[in-house]
Protein backbone atom coordinates (compact mmCIF):
# COMPACT_ATOMS: atom_id res chain seq x y z
CA UNK A 1 0.00 0.00 0.00
CA UNK A 2 2.75 2.40 0.96
CA UNK A 3 4.63 1.98 -2.31
CA UNK A 4 1.47 2.98 -4.18
CA UNK A 5 1.13 6.08 -2.06
CA UNK A 6 4.76 6.98 -2.68
CA UNK A 7 4.26 6.66 -6.42
CA UNK A 8 1.09 8.71 -6.31
CA UNK A 9 2.96 11.46 -4.52
CA UNK A 10 5.67 11.58 -7.15
CA UNK A 11 8.41 10.00 -5.06
CA UNK A 12 11.06 7.90 -6.76
CA UNK A 13 10.31 4.18 -6.76
CA UNK A 14 12.00 2.07 -4.13
CA UNK A 15 14.94 0.17 -5.51
CA UNK A 16 14.07 -3.30 -6.75
CA UNK A 17 17.12 -3.78 -8.93
CA UNK A 18 17.63 -6.66 -11.32
CA UNK A 19 20.93 -7.61 -9.65
CA UNK A 20 19.13 -7.90 -6.33
CA UNK A 21 16.53 -10.19 -7.87
CA UNK A 22 19.35 -12.39 -9.14
CA UNK A 23 20.78 -12.67 -5.63
CA UNK A 24 17.39 -13.70 -4.24
CA UNK A 25 16.86 -16.20 -7.06
CA UNK A 26 20.23 -17.81 -6.35
CA UNK A 27 19.19 -18.90 -2.83
CA UNK A 28 19.22 -22.70 -3.01
CA UNK A 29 16.77 -24.97 -1.16
CA UNK A 30 19.10 -27.91 -1.93
CA UNK A 31 22.07 -26.31 -0.18
CA UNK A 32 19.86 -25.33 2.78
CA UNK A 33 18.60 -28.93 2.99
CA UNK A 34 22.17 -30.26 2.90
CA UNK A 35 23.34 -27.85 5.62
CA UNK A 36 20.48 -28.78 7.95
CA UNK A 37 21.29 -32.47 7.39
CA UNK A 38 25.00 -31.88 8.08
CA UNK A 39 24.29 -29.96 11.29
CA UNK A 40 21.84 -32.60 12.55
CA UNK A 41 24.47 -35.20 11.63
CA UNK A 42 26.78 -34.00 14.40
CA UNK A 43 24.50 -35.96 16.77
CA UNK A 44 24.34 -33.31 19.43
CA UNK A 45 25.45 -29.68 19.39
CA UNK A 46 24.83 -29.18 23.09
CA UNK A 47 26.96 -26.27 24.35
CA UNK A 48 28.68 -28.53 26.90
CA UNK A 49 29.06 -31.50 24.56
CA UNK A 50 32.42 -32.78 23.46
CA UNK A 51 34.79 -30.65 21.44
CA UNK A 52 37.51 -33.12 20.38
CA UNK A 53 35.70 -35.36 17.91
CA UNK A 54 35.51 -34.27 14.27
CA UNK A 55 32.17 -35.98 13.73
CA UNK A 56 30.13 -35.45 16.90
CA UNK A 57 29.50 -32.59 19.31
CA UNK A 58 29.68 -28.81 19.29
CA UNK A 59 33.40 -28.61 18.54
CA UNK A 60 32.98 -30.51 15.28
CA UNK A 61 29.98 -28.33 14.40
CA UNK A 62 31.75 -25.01 14.93
CA UNK A 63 34.88 -26.07 13.03
CA UNK A 64 32.70 -27.19 10.13
CA UNK A 65 30.81 -23.86 10.20
CA UNK A 66 34.04 -21.85 10.13
CA UNK A 67 35.39 -23.88 7.21
CA UNK A 68 32.09 -23.55 5.36
CA UNK A 69 32.05 -19.73 5.76
CA UNK A 70 35.64 -19.61 4.49
CA UNK A 71 34.68 -21.70 1.47
CA UNK A 72 31.56 -19.60 0.80
CA UNK A 73 33.47 -16.32 0.78
CA UNK A 74 36.75 -17.41 -0.86
CA UNK A 75 35.93 -15.65 -4.13
CA UNK A 76 35.48 -12.14 -2.74
CA UNK A 77 38.92 -10.77 -3.44
CA UNK A 78 38.94 -12.12 -6.98
CA UNK A 79 35.63 -10.28 -7.40
CA UNK A 80 37.33 -7.04 -6.33
CA UNK A 81 35.81 -6.89 -2.85
CA UNK A 82 37.51 -6.62 0.55
CA UNK A 83 38.22 -10.11 1.91
CA UNK A 84 35.78 -11.68 4.35
CA UNK A 85 36.96 -12.16 7.93
CA UNK A 86 35.95 -15.51 9.42
CA UNK A 87 36.78 -16.24 13.05
CA UNK A 88 35.66 -17.66 16.39
CA UNK A 89 34.32 -15.10 18.86
CA UNK A 90 35.09 -16.95 22.07
CA UNK A 91 33.84 -16.25 25.58
CA UNK A 92 34.67 -18.18 28.76
CA UNK A 93 31.54 -18.79 30.83
CA UNK A 94 31.90 -19.84 34.46
CA UNK A 95 29.44 -22.24 36.14
CA UNK A 96 26.20 -20.37 36.85
CA UNK A 97 24.53 -22.87 39.21
CA UNK A 98 21.90 -23.52 36.57
CA UNK A 99 22.55 -24.67 33.02
CA UNK A 100 26.33 -24.11 32.83
CA UNK A 101 27.77 -26.82 35.08
CA UNK A 102 31.48 -26.30 34.40
CA UNK A 103 33.76 -23.64 32.92
CA UNK A 104 32.81 -23.60 29.25
CA UNK A 105 34.18 -22.04 26.11
CA UNK A 106 31.21 -20.56 24.26
CA UNK A 107 32.30 -19.82 20.69
CA UNK A 108 30.28 -17.82 18.21
CA UNK A 109 31.29 -18.24 14.57
CA UNK A 110 31.68 -14.87 12.85
CA UNK A 111 31.71 -14.16 9.14
CA UNK A 112 32.24 -10.47 8.36
CA UNK A 113 31.62 -9.14 4.85
CA UNK A 114 33.20 -5.65 4.93
CA UNK A 115 31.27 -2.84 3.25
CA UNK A 116 32.69 -1.13 0.18
CA UNK A 117 31.74 2.50 0.93
CA UNK A 118 34.19 4.15 3.35
CA UNK A 119 31.46 6.36 4.85
CA UNK A 120 29.20 3.33 5.45
CA UNK A 121 31.59 0.45 6.21
CA UNK A 122 31.49 1.20 9.97
CA UNK A 123 27.76 0.45 10.05
CA UNK A 124 27.16 -3.19 10.98
CA UNK A 125 24.14 -5.32 10.07
CA UNK A 126 23.95 -8.72 11.78
CA UNK A 127 22.09 -11.90 10.95
CA UNK A 128 22.35 -14.39 13.79
CA UNK A 129 21.06 -17.86 14.68
CA UNK A 130 22.07 -20.39 17.33
CA UNK A 131 23.94 -23.53 16.39
CA UNK A 132 23.74 -25.21 19.79
CA UNK A 133 20.93 -27.70 20.40
CA UNK A 134 19.29 -29.50 23.30
CA UNK A 135 17.14 -32.54 24.07
CA UNK A 136 14.41 -33.06 26.71
CA UNK A 137 16.89 -32.67 29.58
CA UNK A 138 18.67 -29.36 29.03
CA UNK A 139 21.73 -30.72 30.86
CA UNK A 140 22.10 -33.95 28.87
CA UNK A 141 25.25 -33.44 26.80
CA UNK A 142 25.39 -36.99 25.38
CA UNK A 143 22.00 -37.90 23.96
CA UNK A 144 21.15 -37.09 20.33
CA UNK A 145 19.79 -33.56 19.91
CA UNK A 146 19.48 -33.00 16.14
CA UNK A 147 18.09 -29.46 16.52
CA UNK A 148 17.14 -29.36 12.85
CA UNK A 149 14.54 -26.63 13.01
CA UNK A 150 15.80 -25.22 16.35
CA UNK A 151 18.05 -23.89 15.07
CA UNK A 152 20.00 -25.55 12.26
CA UNK A 153 17.41 -23.84 10.02
CA UNK A 154 18.61 -20.38 11.07
CA UNK A 155 22.27 -21.42 10.87
CA UNK A 156 21.80 -22.80 7.35
CA UNK A 157 20.18 -19.46 6.46
CA UNK A 158 23.33 -17.64 7.67
CA UNK A 159 25.57 -19.90 5.56
CA UNK A 160 23.41 -19.42 2.49
CA UNK A 161 23.48 -15.63 2.94
CA UNK A 162 27.29 -15.84 2.97
CA UNK A 163 27.21 -17.70 -0.34
CA UNK A 164 24.73 -15.49 -2.19
CA UNK A 165 26.02 -12.16 -0.84
CA UNK A 166 29.75 -12.93 -0.88
CA UNK A 167 30.40 -11.39 -4.28
CA UNK A 168 27.64 -8.77 -4.19
CA UNK A 169 28.97 -5.33 -3.17
CA UNK A 170 27.18 -3.74 -0.22
CA UNK A 171 27.93 -0.26 1.12
CA UNK A 172 27.83 -1.20 4.80
CA UNK A 173 29.26 -4.24 6.59
CA UNK A 174 27.32 -7.47 7.09
CA UNK A 175 28.06 -9.87 9.95
CA UNK A 176 26.71 -13.43 9.79
CA UNK A 177 27.05 -15.04 13.20
CA UNK A 178 25.83 -18.44 14.39
CA UNK A 179 26.07 -18.28 18.19
CA UNK A 180 26.30 -20.92 20.93
CA UNK A 181 24.93 -21.15 24.47
CA UNK A 182 21.40 -20.08 23.55
CA UNK A 183 19.69 -23.07 25.14
CA UNK A 184 21.78 -22.63 28.31
CA UNK A 185 20.74 -18.98 28.71
CA UNK A 186 21.57 -16.86 25.65
CA UNK A 187 25.26 -16.88 26.57
CA UNK A 188 26.90 -16.42 23.18
CA UNK A 189 24.68 -13.58 21.97
CA UNK A 190 24.70 -11.76 25.31
CA UNK A 191 28.48 -11.94 25.65
CA UNK A 192 28.93 -10.64 22.12
CA UNK A 193 26.43 -7.80 22.60
CA UNK A 194 28.05 -6.74 25.89
CA UNK A 195 31.49 -6.72 24.33
CA UNK A 196 30.14 -4.78 21.34
CA UNK A 197 28.67 -2.14 23.65
CA UNK A 198 31.97 -1.82 25.56
CA UNK A 199 34.20 -1.82 22.46
CA UNK A 200 36.43 1.11 21.49
CA UNK A 201 36.74 2.37 25.03
CA UNK A 202 33.00 2.48 25.56
CA UNK A 203 32.07 4.09 22.26
CA UNK A 204 30.65 0.73 21.19
CA UNK A 205 30.43 -0.95 17.83
CA UNK A 206 28.04 0.72 15.41
CA UNK A 207 25.52 -2.14 15.21
CA UNK A 208 22.48 -0.76 13.38
CA UNK A 209 20.33 -3.88 13.16
CA UNK A 210 20.28 -7.51 14.27
CA UNK A 211 18.04 -10.08 12.57
CA UNK A 212 17.84 -13.23 14.69
CA UNK A 213 16.46 -16.28 12.88
CA UNK A 214 15.42 -18.98 15.34
CA UNK A 215 13.15 -21.75 14.03
CA UNK A 216 12.51 -20.66 10.47
CA UNK A 217 12.24 -24.01 8.67
CA UNK A 218 8.85 -25.54 9.48
CA UNK A 219 5.72 -23.72 8.32
CA UNK A 220 3.43 -26.46 9.62
CA UNK A 221 1.95 -26.84 13.06
CA UNK A 222 -0.09 -29.38 14.97
CA UNK A 223 -3.64 -30.12 13.93
CA UNK A 224 -3.04 -29.36 10.23
CA UNK A 225 -2.04 -25.75 10.81
CA UNK A 226 0.04 -24.23 8.01
CA UNK A 227 1.53 -20.79 7.34
CA UNK A 228 3.70 -21.28 4.26
CA UNK A 229 3.69 -17.60 3.23
CA UNK A 230 4.41 -15.94 6.57
CA UNK A 231 7.11 -15.63 9.19
CA UNK A 232 6.66 -13.84 12.49
CA UNK A 233 8.88 -10.86 13.25
CA UNK A 234 8.95 -9.92 16.94
CA UNK A 235 10.09 -6.47 18.05
CA UNK A 236 10.25 -4.74 21.41
CA UNK A 237 8.17 -1.61 22.05
CA UNK A 238 9.69 -0.28 25.28
CA UNK A 239 13.44 -0.76 24.83
CA UNK A 240 14.89 -3.33 27.24
CA UNK A 241 17.97 -1.14 27.56
CA UNK A 242 16.18 1.54 29.57
CA UNK A 243 15.51 -1.08 32.25
CA UNK A 244 19.05 -2.46 32.14
CA UNK A 245 20.84 0.80 32.78
CA UNK A 246 20.16 2.02 36.32
CA UNK A 247 21.73 5.39 35.56
CA UNK A 248 18.82 6.17 33.22
CA UNK A 249 16.30 5.80 36.04
CA UNK A 250 12.62 6.62 35.72
CA UNK A 251 13.39 9.59 33.47
CA UNK A 252 13.83 7.33 30.45
CA UNK A 253 10.41 5.79 31.03
CA UNK A 254 8.86 9.24 31.50
CA UNK A 255 10.31 10.34 28.17
CA UNK A 256 8.71 7.34 26.46
CA UNK A 257 5.36 8.34 27.94
CA UNK A 258 5.60 12.02 27.18
CA UNK A 259 6.48 11.47 23.51
CA UNK A 260 4.24 8.37 23.17
CA UNK A 261 7.12 6.35 21.76
CA UNK A 262 5.93 3.07 23.25
CA UNK A 263 5.51 1.63 19.75
CA UNK A 264 8.34 3.53 18.06
CA UNK A 265 11.58 2.04 19.35
CA UNK A 266 14.43 1.49 16.90
CA UNK A 267 13.62 -2.23 16.92
CA UNK A 268 10.03 -1.51 15.95
CA UNK A 269 11.17 0.78 13.11
CA UNK A 270 13.41 -2.08 11.99
CA UNK A 271 10.42 -4.45 11.98
CA UNK A 272 8.42 -1.94 9.92
CA UNK A 273 11.36 -1.57 7.54
CA UNK A 274 11.37 -5.35 7.00
CA UNK A 275 7.66 -5.24 6.18
CA UNK A 276 8.36 -2.42 3.76
CA UNK A 277 11.13 -4.39 2.01
CA UNK A 278 8.84 -7.43 1.71
CA UNK A 279 6.22 -5.19 0.12
CA UNK A 280 8.65 -3.64 -2.36
CA UNK A 281 10.13 -6.98 -3.41
CA UNK A 282 6.89 -8.96 -3.24
CA UNK A 283 8.65 -11.74 -1.35
CA UNK A 284 6.82 -15.08 -1.21
CA UNK A 285 7.15 -15.18 2.58
CA UNK A 286 5.84 -11.99 4.15
CA UNK A 287 6.57 -10.88 7.70
CA UNK A 288 3.75 -11.00 10.22
CA UNK A 289 4.78 -8.29 12.65
CA UNK A 290 4.18 -9.14 16.28
CA UNK A 291 4.46 -6.14 18.56
CA UNK A 292 6.04 -7.78 21.59
CA UNK A 293 9.67 -8.56 22.41
CA UNK A 294 9.31 -12.29 21.77
CA UNK A 295 6.77 -15.06 22.15
CA UNK A 296 4.66 -14.87 25.33
CA UNK A 297 7.08 -14.77 28.30
CA UNK A 298 9.89 -16.30 26.24
CA UNK A 299 13.20 -14.92 24.97
CA UNK A 300 15.91 -15.36 22.40
CA UNK A 301 19.29 -14.18 21.19
CA UNK A 302 17.97 -10.84 19.93
CA UNK A 303 17.07 -10.01 23.57
CA UNK A 304 20.78 -9.86 24.44
CA UNK A 305 21.28 -7.14 21.83
CA UNK A 306 18.12 -5.29 22.91
CA UNK A 307 19.45 -5.21 26.48
CA UNK A 308 22.53 -3.35 25.22
CA UNK A 309 20.46 -0.82 23.31
CA UNK A 310 20.81 -2.27 19.80
CA UNK A 311 17.88 -2.60 17.40
CA UNK A 312 17.18 -6.32 17.12
CA UNK A 313 14.23 -8.45 16.03
CA UNK A 314 13.41 -12.16 15.94
CA UNK A 315 12.18 -14.18 12.94
CA UNK A 316 10.25 -17.36 13.82
CA UNK A 317 7.75 -19.45 11.86
CA UNK A 318 4.08 -18.89 12.73
CA UNK A 319 3.18 -22.22 14.36
CA UNK A 320 5.44 -24.07 16.77
CA UNK A 321 5.35 -27.85 17.19
CA UNK A 322 6.19 -28.64 20.78
CA UNK A 323 6.47 -32.39 20.03
CA UNK A 324 9.50 -31.52 17.92
CA UNK A 325 11.08 -28.78 20.04
CA UNK A 326 13.47 -29.63 22.90
CA UNK A 327 12.47 -33.33 22.75
CA UNK A 328 14.43 -36.57 22.81
CA UNK A 329 14.04 -38.42 19.53
CA UNK A 330 11.56 -41.23 20.27
CA UNK A 331 8.15 -42.68 19.54
CA UNK A 332 5.56 -42.87 22.31
CA UNK A 333 2.06 -44.23 21.82
CA UNK A 334 2.42 -43.83 18.09
CA UNK A 335 3.54 -40.19 18.31
CA UNK A 336 6.98 -39.27 16.95
CA UNK A 337 9.00 -36.79 18.97
CA UNK A 338 12.21 -34.94 18.11
CA UNK A 339 13.56 -32.06 16.06
CA UNK A 340 14.45 -34.01 12.92
CA UNK A 341 15.56 -32.72 9.50
CA UNK A 342 12.55 -34.34 7.82
CA UNK A 343 10.35 -31.67 9.43
CA UNK A 344 12.27 -28.81 7.81
CA UNK A 345 10.79 -27.60 4.51
CA UNK A 346 13.74 -26.35 2.43
CA UNK A 347 11.51 -24.37 0.08
CA UNK A 348 10.02 -22.41 2.96
CA UNK A 349 13.44 -21.93 4.53
CA UNK A 350 14.70 -20.60 1.18
CA UNK A 351 11.89 -18.05 1.09
CA UNK A 352 12.68 -16.85 4.63
CA UNK A 353 16.34 -16.61 3.56
CA UNK A 354 15.28 -14.44 0.59
CA UNK A 355 13.38 -12.09 2.90
CA UNK A 356 16.52 -11.75 5.07
CA UNK A 357 18.71 -11.20 1.99
CA UNK A 358 16.44 -8.48 0.58
CA UNK A 359 16.35 -6.78 3.97
CA UNK A 360 20.14 -6.86 4.31
CA UNK A 361 20.66 -5.49 0.82
CA UNK A 362 18.31 -2.56 1.43
CA UNK A 363 19.63 -1.79 4.94
CA UNK A 364 23.29 -2.02 3.94
CA UNK A 365 22.96 -0.03 0.72
CA UNK A 366 20.63 2.70 1.98
CA UNK A 367 22.09 5.79 3.65
CA UNK A 368 22.08 6.08 7.45
CA UNK A 369 18.84 6.70 9.26
CA UNK A 370 18.64 10.51 9.47
CA UNK A 371 20.37 11.65 12.64
CA UNK A 372 19.05 14.00 15.28
CA UNK A 373 15.49 13.94 13.91
CA UNK A 374 13.31 16.33 15.85
CA UNK A 375 9.92 18.01 16.00
CA UNK A 376 10.34 21.71 16.62
CA UNK A 377 8.26 22.90 19.56
CA UNK A 378 9.52 26.46 20.04
CA UNK A 379 5.97 27.77 19.82
CA UNK A 380 2.46 26.31 19.64
CA UNK A 381 1.37 25.71 16.07
CA UNK A 382 -1.13 23.68 14.06
CA UNK A 383 1.62 22.71 11.68
CA UNK A 384 4.45 20.26 12.27
CA UNK A 385 8.03 21.34 11.65
CA UNK A 386 10.56 18.51 11.32
CA UNK A 387 14.34 18.90 11.17
CA UNK A 388 17.13 16.34 10.86
CA UNK A 389 20.84 16.13 10.12
CA UNK A 390 22.08 15.09 6.69
CA UNK A 391 23.10 11.45 6.34
CA UNK A 392 26.88 11.22 5.82
CA UNK A 393 26.90 8.86 2.83
CA UNK A 394 27.82 10.69 -0.41
CA UNK A 395 25.11 8.91 -2.44
CA UNK A 396 22.34 10.27 -0.19
CA UNK A 397 19.81 11.70 -2.64
CA UNK A 398 17.02 12.90 -0.40
CA UNK A 399 14.55 12.23 2.39
CA UNK A 400 11.01 11.04 2.84
CA UNK A 401 8.72 12.20 5.59
CA UNK A 402 6.33 9.46 6.70
CA UNK A 403 3.32 9.65 8.95
CA UNK A 404 0.46 7.61 10.37
CA UNK A 405 -2.54 8.08 12.63
CA UNK A 406 -1.77 7.43 16.30
CA UNK A 407 -3.96 4.33 16.14
CA UNK A 408 -2.19 2.84 13.10
CA UNK A 409 0.50 0.20 13.50
CA UNK A 410 2.51 0.93 10.34
CA UNK A 411 3.45 4.06 8.42
CA UNK A 412 0.60 4.77 6.02
CA UNK A 413 1.84 7.87 4.20
CA UNK A 414 5.16 8.92 2.68
CA UNK A 415 6.19 12.10 0.95
CA UNK A 416 9.40 12.66 -0.95
CA UNK A 417 10.71 16.02 0.27
CA UNK A 418 13.99 15.89 -1.66
CA UNK A 419 17.49 16.84 -0.50
CA UNK A 420 16.44 19.12 2.36
CA UNK A 421 16.80 18.95 6.13
CA UNK A 422 13.57 20.62 7.17
CA UNK A 423 9.96 20.02 6.31
CA UNK A 424 6.78 21.71 7.49
CA UNK A 425 3.64 19.59 7.31
CA UNK A 426 0.20 21.21 7.52
CA UNK A 427 -0.87 18.24 9.67
CA UNK A 428 -0.79 18.62 13.45
CA UNK A 429 1.75 16.69 15.55
CA UNK A 430 -1.09 16.33 18.08
CA UNK A 431 -2.96 13.99 15.77
CA UNK A 432 -0.25 12.18 13.78
CA UNK A 433 3.01 10.38 14.34
CA UNK A 434 5.78 11.58 12.02
CA UNK A 435 9.07 10.08 10.96
CA UNK A 436 11.79 10.66 8.38
CA UNK A 437 13.98 8.32 6.35
CA UNK A 438 16.75 8.82 3.84
CA UNK A 439 17.15 7.40 0.33
CA UNK A 440 20.08 7.10 -2.02
CA UNK A 441 20.49 7.68 -5.74
CA UNK A 442 19.38 4.08 -6.42
CA UNK A 443 16.22 4.41 -4.31
CA UNK A 444 17.36 2.33 -1.33
CA UNK A 445 15.59 3.61 1.78
CA UNK A 446 16.72 3.61 5.39
CA UNK A 447 14.49 2.66 8.32
CA UNK A 448 12.55 5.54 9.85
CA UNK A 449 13.93 7.92 12.46
CA UNK A 450 11.30 8.79 15.06
CA UNK A 451 11.85 12.40 16.10
CA UNK A 452 12.35 13.72 19.60
CA UNK A 453 11.06 17.15 20.64
CA UNK A 454 13.37 20.16 20.40
CA UNK A 455 12.71 23.74 21.43
CA UNK A 456 14.81 25.53 18.84
ZN1 LIG B 1 16.01 -21.79 19.38
Image (spheres, rainbow, N blue to C red):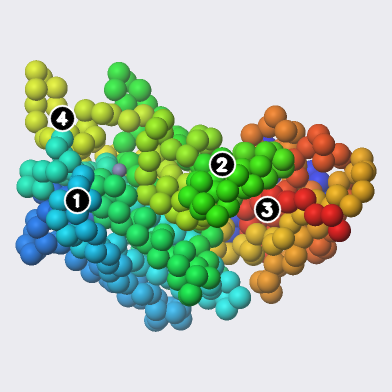
At x 29%, y 62%, the residue is 108
Q: Are marks 2 and 3 in contact (CB under 8 Å)?
A: no
Seen at 63% across and 63% down, the residue is 368
Question: Does residue 112 appear in this view?
Answer: yes
> Could you classify mark 3 by the number of other residues whose Cα lies within 10 Å: few (under 14), some (14-19), or many (20 or more)?
many
Ligand 1 shows up in the quarter that is top left
Screen quadrant of the N terminus:
top right
Dot in front, 4 or 3: 3
Disc marking residue 449:
3
Q: Which mark is residue 100?
A: 1
Circle 3 — which element? loop
Residue 86 lies in quadrant: bottom left
Left or right, 34 with reference to 399: left
* Residue 410 position (above or below residue 440): above
Q: Secondary structure at mark 4?
A: strand
> Residue drawn at (80%, 54%), measured in percent from left and top?
454
Does label 2 or label 3 sit earlier along the sequence? 2
Q: Circle 4 is placed at which residue position?
A: 337
* Mark 2 vs mark 3, CA separation in Å: 16 Å
Q: Label 2: which residue? A: 238
Q: Earlier in the sequence, mark 2 or mark 4?
A: 2
Q: Judge depth for marks 2 and 3 and give the one in front.
A: 2
**Residue 157 in sight from this viewpoint:** no
Q: From the image, state whether disc 2 or disc 4 is nearer to you.
A: 2
Residue 362 versus residue 144 in the image, above or below: below
Sequence-earlier tag: 1 or 2:
1
Separation of residues labelled 1 and 2 (CA atoms): 30 Å
Marks 1, 4: nearer the viewer: 1
Amino acid sequence: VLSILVAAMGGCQPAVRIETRAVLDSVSPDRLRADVDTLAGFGTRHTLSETVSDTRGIGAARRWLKAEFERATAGREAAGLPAARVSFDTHIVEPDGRRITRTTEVANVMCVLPGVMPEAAGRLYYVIAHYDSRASDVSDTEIDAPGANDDASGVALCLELARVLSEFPLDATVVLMPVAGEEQGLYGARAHARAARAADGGAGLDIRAVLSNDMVGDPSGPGGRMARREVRVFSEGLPAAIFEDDTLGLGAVRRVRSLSTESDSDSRQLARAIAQVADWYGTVVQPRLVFRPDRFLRGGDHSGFNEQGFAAVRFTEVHESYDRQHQDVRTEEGIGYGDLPEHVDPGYLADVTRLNAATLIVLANAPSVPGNARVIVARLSNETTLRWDPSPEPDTAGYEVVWRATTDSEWTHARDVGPVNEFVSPLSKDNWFFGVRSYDSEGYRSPVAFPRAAGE
